[in-house]
Amino acid sequence: MSITVKDVEHVANLARLELSEAEKDRLAGQLSTILEYADKLNELDTNGIEPTSHVLPIYNVMREDEVRPSLSAEKALLNAPEEEDGHFRVPAVME
Amino acid sequence: MSLFDMRLSDIHNRLHHKDLSVSELVDASLKQIGETDGKIGAFLTMDEAGAKKQAGELDAWTGERGLLFGLPAGIKDNIVTEGLRTTCASQFLANYNPIYDAGVVTKLKSAQSVTVGKLNMDEFAMGGSNENSSFHPVRNPWDTSRVPGGSSGGSAASVAAGQVYFSLGSDTGGSIRQPAAYCGVVGLKPTYGLVSRYGLVAFASSLDQIGPITKNVEDAAYVLQAIAGHDERDSTSANVDIPDYASSLTGDVKGLRIAVPKEYFGEGVDTQVKERVLEALKVYESMGAVWEEVSLPHTEYAVAAYYLLASSEASSNLARFDGVRYGVRSENPANLLDLYRRSRSDGFGAEVKRRIMLGTYALSSGYYDAYYKKAQQVRTLVKRDFDQVFERFDIILAPTAPTTAFKLGEQADDPLTMYMNDICTIPASLAGIPAISIPCGLAEGLPVGLQIMGKPFDEATVLRAAHAYEGNTEHHKLRPAL
């Protein structure tokens, strides 16, 4: 699987990363090498094999829907880069 | 002899008879860190004042003593500690002060160990050399021109250098076991779900597991005892009975059935590493264990499956680092999208970006079935290999890593070669089974790790086998000359 700089740009956009031209070039090469190696998996016939998402026999974990103490707004904001009036502050979402 | 070479029971006896105080233990730890960490670089954040204060409190303590009472410990920096900076060795979190304690940290507090600081690692636990720390690399105490392994490189190096009595690491594809092997110490990755991951900064959620790094197997059993157990705050935490691990250390392995998978002794595995592991097998034989060569046929596919799965999960988990609620935020963003992009690009290092890119690609429209789902199916095959072997055997014995510690910079520009270092540890991670690395001698002056894998939730047998070997050998007593 050969990854082009254009592929890298598309994936970087999905991943919310901004890459320099040098990073794009390097990643196109490195991702191609890794994905070529990953193509090794195609040697195996996996038709009808159940995928494993995790190994435990635990599925949905439920609890009673009762109110419990939770994080205070004050604590939640302690690491905020910017805050205002008890909220996280971000640039305008609507132009 | 360093205080930290004493057995836990001897330390506790001396504390009990007031021949030793917790303050002395903590001072010894701080002194050793002060004298050696300039060379090693194991610590990212120290809590000297907090450790001394806690030592004073424990010296005045008259109640019942916790299992790890007074023992100085270091904690990998992806495990959150309330009020103590936790960075994941990433510039993104360079100033992050957690507002709560991880489940294991709460457990250590009730076991009354003393946390002296936070340990260096590969950024967000991605790497096998500790060169991906965005602060500074860790160096191997056995040879400071070499890597300590990773990602829990600081955790392994600090124990090897006698800086702490024990440490906690985390293991996703070998990140406890491989550095333990490179640094000549004991590292245990428990069964997936045995130890709560509440407060472990997530890398690959279907694989991540916290475990102890210690100087001997007995200590690993005690630390595991202290941190294992169900936690409703981690929905993947298993609700199982926790046995008394120390009581399983009988020294008896007569009749123990050992499987030796031929795939772990193939091309790429260093000759001397193989020799050390085969010598270990002879030791088991002499103790009355029986062994047989077996095949785990899907081993060669495990690395490819792992890097697709772990990177995919990482790309999703690391989406939370957006510059809004914590971590770095870039200056003067044009809009919200620009804020996300630039904060992430400024905050993440090269390996983290590479894995996010790989994972995003594998999960993206049109490629999901070919890569992510395919890797999940191969994971099933890898797990079945183990299930079949464990129908007939009690443990599986193999090298922990194909080589000993390599030099800093040697593999830094070649991600795929770096990923292949994990070939011996990844299969157990995919299968979710417990695995320990213990020292089994040296190759050209560098430690070699013996890996013992066991059945799910059968840490007791893994520890028993490891402990019996240790009791018949002297390898775990070797210390680096610092």
Image: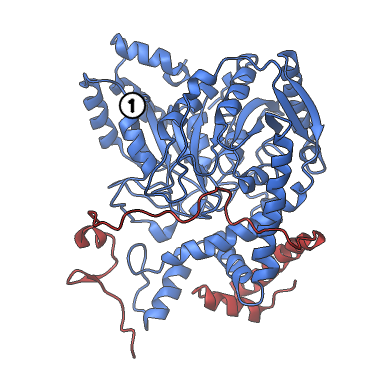
The letter of the red chain is A
Residue at 43% across, 43% down: B196
- Toward the bottom, the furthest residue is A95
Residue at 61% across, 59% down: B309
Residue B255's place in the image compared with B385, above or below, is: above
- Toward the left, the furthest residue is A85
Query: Where does label 1 land, which residue?
Result: B26
Q: Amino acid at mark 1?
A: Val
- Toward the front, the furthest residue is A64
Residue at 73% across, 14% down: B288
Residue B326's place in the image compared with B174, above or below, is: below
**Number of numbered discs overlaid on the protein picture:** 1
Relative image position of residue B24 (x, y in whole percent): 31, 20
Residue at 21% across, 59% down: A72
Relative image position of residue B394 (x, y in whole percent): 68, 28
Determine whether, in the image, residue B300 is placed left or right of residue B136: right
Between B227 and B165, the residue placed more toward the observer is B227
Residue B415: tell me if it is visible: no
Which image quarter: residue B179?
top right
The colour applied to the residues of chain B in this rendering is blue
